[in-house]
């Protein structure tokens, strides 16, 4: 989230009255961008990642680990650092680092605020270029970000890359400094208002979402039933007798059902960390193509990066953060939710403004009408204006869908005069539509092109993993463009996949709808790298694209292993074999290829189950902990030890060391063969395997 300028943020009923104006002006700004940039050509294929961190205070001997609320101070320290501020600064050598940074001139990373006052975001100093060598810079840059962040923290503070803090919202202290719940903005039973970034934008966002809904957000996650978990289970942390705010009635009115971990504030969702990748396309057509083709991969990559098994001190019966964020910012009214007949609101809306995306936007002739969402809600007036302004029907439909939402945070000062050289009103709606893909038009002020953001992945514990998933997505994107791949399936099936990705160990237990034949036409030796069917173990497609096939025969339910690694009897060759073929078709030097192979290997083995997802690793860690009573409770000591383990892994990684002797439960099954450098194989936990669940 970028920070907007300060101003007078309107409270909800006032903001609602100005919503029409923001949409109206937003559409005018969008048309301005469209007319300026629709013919933009030959933009470079740049890309960039975003890594989000929790900041914790941890000490081996303190029994409790806490969320540090010092985001502002840390960002201030980072901003005051002259070396960091110096433009065009070089990536300094990282001590003990074994992977050499290839580019000597990449600017230092940039740090950004996030919703949680315990969060940080870091991006590369400038986007990555198209060169393959550049891919080798990603992991060192991510390690550098972590190192720089740490250097600007107190000695007991650490940036860690877990999606969620396991005990956020638990009774007792979980932040430093301590603030008791609750406050006027969130009105939460469980977290104080001080949990959110104090910049007026964030508390207003939370308060206005709550006001628009007419009650608190309801973030309920099914509890994981272990053998000693009471059945039925009642969330013991819910207080049904509170009378601080009118919203305390929510719990008495059924907001906290049996067998669910109950959470009631935006911080439980937007306080989660993810890994996002933004790609710049060479022109708008390619951007629209990438948006569509990456879309079906969203749920697949969510399942593969699953990392969120614990909420509020309890094991959840889901593995990923997605739906919790969705619910944490669900601003829909009872009428929009279909709980009451429509009277004041304009339409029923099937999804939260944070949800899997509902449109395909490409001009690709392979995009069949049957793939589109039959329940898509659009604002017909907005669409008419966009079409009148020259936008084609399909893209106008996309934006007319995003614009069914109200702007949530409106600054009085911005409503005085419409500035068509700005995009603030457009961005107001666009950037609070948190879909799993985002189509980003060029901003007004500089020379940036049409971009597409891939937003579903969960953050991983190590930078090795985060680099692996980032680079994998880059390679898949290149393969999509190079082979003109076709991953289209009906959007409704993508929605369904998103739900399936939540299932515990969905990576192994679920099947996901996926297109069987991704190739534009029957591949021949002449036009693709997939001509050679004779390779041993080859699972290359054996039949033409079958344009006449009924839609529901174009796809089938596959395991993630089949989608990622391919399967001998199936039509789908597998994402990794596709990427390998792509790499075979271009010139990549041996060293780069070797490094990329370690990334692909991690992903391949996560998909096959040879390695664990982060979520599985955390579950096993909890399960093996001597204090765990098989009752779904993740207590303070277990949280302390888990985070201690995460920090220990991070420190080893930063120092370029392997994990031998770390004695952290299940580490080899998380990271597998851990490279000290390409070719140097080291095993995670060769000596010192321990099931004590503690760090030594
Ligand atoms: P968001 O709105 O998603 O927070 P940011 O401005 O933080 O967007 O940028 C997200 C990522 O996009 C960063 O990694 C950044 O380096 C990258 N990025 C910036 N400009 C471009 C560009 N022109 N093309 C591709 N990626 C870019
Ligand atoms: Mg972010
Ligand atoms: Mg960002
Ligand atoms: Mg942002
Ligand atoms: Mg982003
Ligand atoms: Mg046990």
Image (spheres, rainbow, N blue to C red):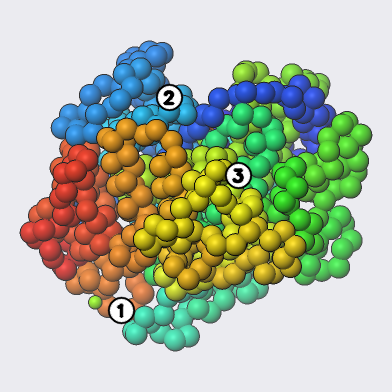
Residue 5 seen in render:
no
User: Disc 2 marks which residue?
Assistant: 125
Mark 2 and mark 3: Cα distance apart in space: 31 Å
Asked if marks 2 and 3 touch (Cβ < 8 Å), the reply is: no
Quarter location, residue 283: top right
Mark 2 and mark 1: Cα distance apart in space: 45 Å
- Answer yes or no: disc 2 within 8 Å of ligand 1: yes
Residue 562, image x and y in percent? Answer: 46, 65
Q: Is residue 496 left or right of residue 403?
A: left
- Image height check: is 632 above or below 37? below
- Image height check: is 220 above or below 173? below
Q: Earlier in the sequence, mark 2 or mark 3?
A: 2
Nearer to me, 461 or 368: 368
Q: Earlier in the sequence, mark 2 or mark 1?
A: 2
Residue 620 seen in render:
yes
Residue 456, image x and y in percent? Answer: 53, 51
Residue that appears at 83% across and 38% down: 392
User: Disc 1 marks which residue?
Assistant: 630
Nearer to me, 379 or 586: 586
User: Disc 3 marks which residue?
Assistant: 484
Residue 372, image x and y in percent? Answer: 75, 57
Label drawn at residue 504: none
Q: What secondary structure is marked by label 1?
A: loop
């Amino acid at each position: 989230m970028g920070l907007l300028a300060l101003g007078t943020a309107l409270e909800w009923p006032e903001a609602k009255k100005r919503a029409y104006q923001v949409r109206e002006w937003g559409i005018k700004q969008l048309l301005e961008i469209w007319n300026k940039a629709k013919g933009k050509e030959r933009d470079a294929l740049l890309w960039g990642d975003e890594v989000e961190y929790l900041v914790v205070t941890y000490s081996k001997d303190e029994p409790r680990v806490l969320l540090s609320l010092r985001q502002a101070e840390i960002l201030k320290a980072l901003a005051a650092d002259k070396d960091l501020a110096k433009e065009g600064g070089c990536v300094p050598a990282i001590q003990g680092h074994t992977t050499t940074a290839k580019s000597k001139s990449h600017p230092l990373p940039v740090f950004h605020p996030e919703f949680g006052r315990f969060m940080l975001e870091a991006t590369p100093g400038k986007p990555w270029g198209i060169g393959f060598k550049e891919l080798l810079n990603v992991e060192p840059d991510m390690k550098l970000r972590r190192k720089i962040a740490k250097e600007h923290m107190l000695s007991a503070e650490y940036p860690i890359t877990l999606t969620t803090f396991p005990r956020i919202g638990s009774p007792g202290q979980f932040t430093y400094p301590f603030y008791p719940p609750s406050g006027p903005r969130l009105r939460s039973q469980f977290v104080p208002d001080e949990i959110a970034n104090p910049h007026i934008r964030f508390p207003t966002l939370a308060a206005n979402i709550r006001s628009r809904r007419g009650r608190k957000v309801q973030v309920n996650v099914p509890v994981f039933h272990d053998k000693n978990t009471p059945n039925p289970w009642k969330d013991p942390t819910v207080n049904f007798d509170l009378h601080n705010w009118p919203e305390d009635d929510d719990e008495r009115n059924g907001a906290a059902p049996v067998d669910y971990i109950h959470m009631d504030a935006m911080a439980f969702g937007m306080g989660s960390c993810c890994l996002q990748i933004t790609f710049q396309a060479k022109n708008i057509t390619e951007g629209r193509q990438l948006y569509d083709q990456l879309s079906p991969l969203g749920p697949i990559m969510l399942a593969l990066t699953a990392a969120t098994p614990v909420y509020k001190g309890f094991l959840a019966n889901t593995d990923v953060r997605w739906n919790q964020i969705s619910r944490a910012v669900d601003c829909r009214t009872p009428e929009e939710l279909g709980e009451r007949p429509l009277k004041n609101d304009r339409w029923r809306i099937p999804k939260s403004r944070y949800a899997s995306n509902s449109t395909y936007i490409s001009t690709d002739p392979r995009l069949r009408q049957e793939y589109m969402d039959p329940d898509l809600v659009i604002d017909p007036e907005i669409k008419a204006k966009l079409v009148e302004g020259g936008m084609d029907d399909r893209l106008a439909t996309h934006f007319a869908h995003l614009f069914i939402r109200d702007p949530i945070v409106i600054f009085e000062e911005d409503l005085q005069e419409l500035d068509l050289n700005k995009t603030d009103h457009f961005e107001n709606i666009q950037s609070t539509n948190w879909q799993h893909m985002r189509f980003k038009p060029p901003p007004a002020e500089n020379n940036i092109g049409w971009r597409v953001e891939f937003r579903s992945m969960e953050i991983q514990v190590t930078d090795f993993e985060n680099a692996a998933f980032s680079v994998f997505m880059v390679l898949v994107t290149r393969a999509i463009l190079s082979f003109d791949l076709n991953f289209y399936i009906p959007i409704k099936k993508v929605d369904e996949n998103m739900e399936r990705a939540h299932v515990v160990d969905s990576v192994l237990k679920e099947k996901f709808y996926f297109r069987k034949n991704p190739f534009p036409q029957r591949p021949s030796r002449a036009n693709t790298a997939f001509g050679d069917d004779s390779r041993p173990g080859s699972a290359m497609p054996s039949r033409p694209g079958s344009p006449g096939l009924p839609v529901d025969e174009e796809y089938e339910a596959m395991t993630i292993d089949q989608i990622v690694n391919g399967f001998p009897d199936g039509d789908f060759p597998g994402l990794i074999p596709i990427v390998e073929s792509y790499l075979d078709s271009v010139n990549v030097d041996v060293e780069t290829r070797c490094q990329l192979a370690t990334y692909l290997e991690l992903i391949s083995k996560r998909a096959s189950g040879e390695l664990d997802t982060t979520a599985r690793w955390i579950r096993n860690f909890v399960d093996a902990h001597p204090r765990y009573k098989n009752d779904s409770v993740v207590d303070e000591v277990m949280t302390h030890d888990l985070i201690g383990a995460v920090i220990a892994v991070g420190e080893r990684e930063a120092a370029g060391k392997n994990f031998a002797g770390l004695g952290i439960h299940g580490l080899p099954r998380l990271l597998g063969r851990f490279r000290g450098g390409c070719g140097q194989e080291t095993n995670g936990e060769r000596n010192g395997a321990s099931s004590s669940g503690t760090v030594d």
